[in-house]
Amino acid sequence: MNTYPALLIVAPLLAALFTGIFVWIEERLCYPIAVLGMLISSFSAYKILMAVLSAGVIHYRHAGWAPPMGIEYRIDTLNAMVLLLITLIALINLVASYKTILVETPDRSGSFITIYLLFVVGLLGVTATGDLFNLYVLLEITSLTSYAQIGLGDKDRGPLASLNYVFIGVIGASFYLLGVGYLYIKTGSLNMMDVATIISTMHDSNTVLVAFILCMIGVWIKMALFPLHVWLPNAYSYAPTAVARVVAPLMTKVMVYVMVRLMITVFGFDYIFSTLDLSAAVVWLATIAILAGGLMALAQKDLKKMLAYIIVSEIGYMVGGAWLGNTTGMTGTILHILNDAVMTFALFLAVGNMIYVCGHVGFDNLKGLFGRMPWTMGGFVLAAFSIIGVPPTCGFFSKWYLVLGAFEAGAYHFAAALIISSLICAILFFRIFEIGFFPEPSDGDDHAHAHHEPAVMVEAPVSMLVPLGLVSLSLIIVGLYSGTIVNTIILPMLQ
Amino acid sequence: MSETLALIIGKYNYWLYIILMMIGLYAMIVKNNLIKKLVGMNIFQTAIILFYVSIGYKTHATIPIIKDSGHGDGHGGGHAVIHAADYINPLPHVLMLTAIVVSVATFGVAMALAVRVYQRYQTLEEDEIRMRLTEE
Amino acid sequence: MRLIGFIIVCICGGLLLYGTSEFPDWGDPASPASTHLSNDYIEKAFDQTQVPNLVTAVLADYRGFDTMFETAVVFCAGLACLLLLRDYSRKKERFYRHVPTGVILQVKHPEKKLPVGTEFEYMDKDWVPSDLIIKNVCRILIPFIQIYALYVVAHGDFSPGGGFQGGVIFGSSLILLAISYNLRTLVQRVKEKALGILCALGVLVYVGIGALCMPLGGNFLDYSALTRIIPWDPHHIRAYGMLGVEIGVGIAVMAVMVVIYINIASEGRHDEGL
């Protein structure tokens, strides 16, 4: 049992290094090594989740030193859930993207897999760590690998989008680092729990206030909260398919996790909501983010760009929920980290399949797609329903908690924004459905029926369809088990 | 008067880092040339290093390498008692070693991206790139 | 834009200044940062690890987990440059000098090559060949730089230095070769494949030493577990563990420096450049 927290992160790291070596010797071995590493990692994440559920918080001391001096992994139910989410999404995407990697980066697929694994290692480390500075280092691995991966995308626009992302990403990470420095100068410690106990006695210090603001701004830049979102749409829409599919669901969500972790563990609710009075302002900001994201999505003519702006809007949901200042809102946010990751993943898997078949996904290129790719569109419809928030899918439940939390806190504008955003999403996706049906309207959106003209059907390969099917089904399964997840994972952590 | 002076002298390192950092941030926001932005980014990151190293400094203390460590006899036993006040804080230096490496790595990747941008647009001026993009 | 930038800068600067008002004075020995953890490190680290350079002790042992990822960051950067820039296509035109006459020939066909040897010499398009003095001085200097780099790596436990610094010095000695001769000389001496493998191998040495501790019963990177296979006393083994990871760091940093230089200088073609 003891070694799983280390294995979780060392397995993909070792896999990355071995692929880095085998790139030069025998490139065909890279892919199996990567899959093996991710399998071990997923299995460890599963074991960790089970252990945390049965025995409580896990502590793992790296290099064997006790926490304030050494670096410690502190894994509670929230980490464990996000860790499992990351490993599973990364594993499924690796399987689903086998063909797209070969098509989009033909002469450097081995190195690409290496950098992909390092990206996953970064995400896992950010999530598992209990040390503020370790979080920064892992954050930089994540950013650096995502710069490289995005730069590999679209030949014309990819590098420029990535370079702009570098500038903004560096500012974000540096602000976080400065915040940590301000905490360090006041506390002399870097361990999250240690810092939390020390600053609980200095709530009126303005250095701690500035540290808090700096950390939050840094994290908001990295997660693309509305006025700081400018890098996201270009970066995500010009990235290679295999990258967009994992960066879009995971990067922003992990940053939301970091925000939640800082709020819960390091600064504490007492400090944020009692001592400071920023909550109302941030909820307003989130409200604006939701509406602005939705409106900008309406103006897009490309499916990938549209989804990117929907992500901007979803970030508003999560930030707003976390800052409502009550347990229901926070529950909604944490549940939405899970749900939004799965929904976005399903959407981007479907879009990836479309790109693999059709080349690009401008709206004019989607005509008659229901006829040509019924299975892919089936998954897309399910994911779209989840984003809109139709009941059996998981998107509904987290939105429900968020709306309840908004009413509890008296933030009616936030609740209204959530509902308006659902309407906007409905408009957005039904427009896509309409385009998809356009040339020859078929009977209903039941994709399972075989279509009348099999000659025009050009589905994506099975290796890409099966993951999409799995993830779409899990949308409903996660939705049905929302109550269990809230009661066993989220609520125990918030008390 | 002497109090303000004491305040300034007591914290001038922290003020200097803020000035340096803001110079970098200004260059990153305002400059038109991508390489100038990169240089601004480097100044910005270096300012943070100055800040951390300032935290680590202690008056009347030396670099954190133990003197008379008794190495050479193979066991290191019998060395003098170590006083914490004699050595400066090693932790910020460790952190900044990491931060330096991170900033060099970021700079390398950013340079590679800038080369790619130049190969595509034959310019590194942002307004010219934007013009090219609208023309297409 | 200038005005907006100025306003943002003023707001940020003001915020940061506001935060400094409660800072302890610069160099204050009683500040929390200099008392809370720092004293523990200074007083205990030497006893626990037998490494007099406390920065190395904290870097490679107490916070060795950070440093492992720091090395991984370096590896990422090298790999990213390779991925983004490496261009496997042949260059369109090449220049040759006919050595006996000094006539310069331009070959436009990408596939055709002249036999490079005593008669013809491949030359860069816009790079003046360095002169005799520079070449010879650098040729004599480079081995000394490399030995110094090895010293810095090996002596990192006792004096300022360590894997990163030594690796950078070693890498720069190779870059000096490229600058004083030309890029092709470097690429011929140090094969791209070797550099690529060394990048990953260096990090692998680090992670491998860390991972080796796990089946031996310790936590990840807990060097004291290595006593099971190497019979030294548990304090000294930490110092040797640190030396091991520093060597790994040195290899990775050296290789990555050269990879970044070659790729950026030649825009990924590995033939000619700065």
Image: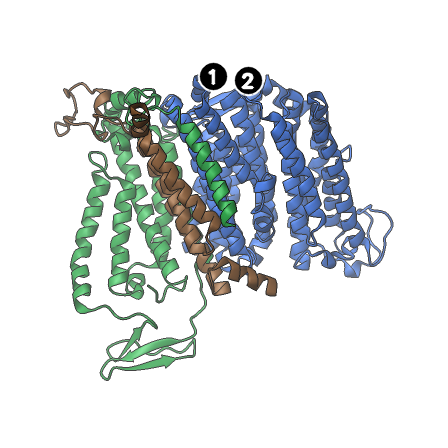
The colour with which the image depicts chain C is green
Q: Where B47 falls versus C95 (above or below)?
A: above
- Left or right, A446 with reference to C82: right
Counting the numbered discs, the total is 2
Toward the left, the furthest residue is B73
Q: Residue at the spot x=42%, y=51% of the render?
A: B38
Residue A146, given in percent of the width and then of the height, sits at 51, 46
- The reply to whether the C-beta atoms of the residues labelled 2 and 1 are less than 8 Å apart is yes
Furthest residue toward top: A201
The picture quadrant where one finds residue C141 is bottom left
Name the amino acid type tagged 1: Ser
Q: Which chain is in brown here?
A: B
Q: Which residue is mark 1?
A: A200
C-alpha span from label 2 to label 1: 9 Å
Identify which residue, A193 or B86, lies in the foreground: B86
The x, y position of residue C159, in whole percent, is 20, 35
Label 2 secondary element? helix
One can see residue C223 in this view: no
Q: Would you name the residue on which mark 2 appears?
A: A270
Query: Relative to the observer, which residue lies in front, A423 or C106?
Result: A423
Label located before the other in sequence (2 or 1) = 1
Badge 1 element: loop
Q: Quadrant of the C terminus of chain A?
A: top right
Image colouring: by chain
Please tell me the colour of chain A: blue
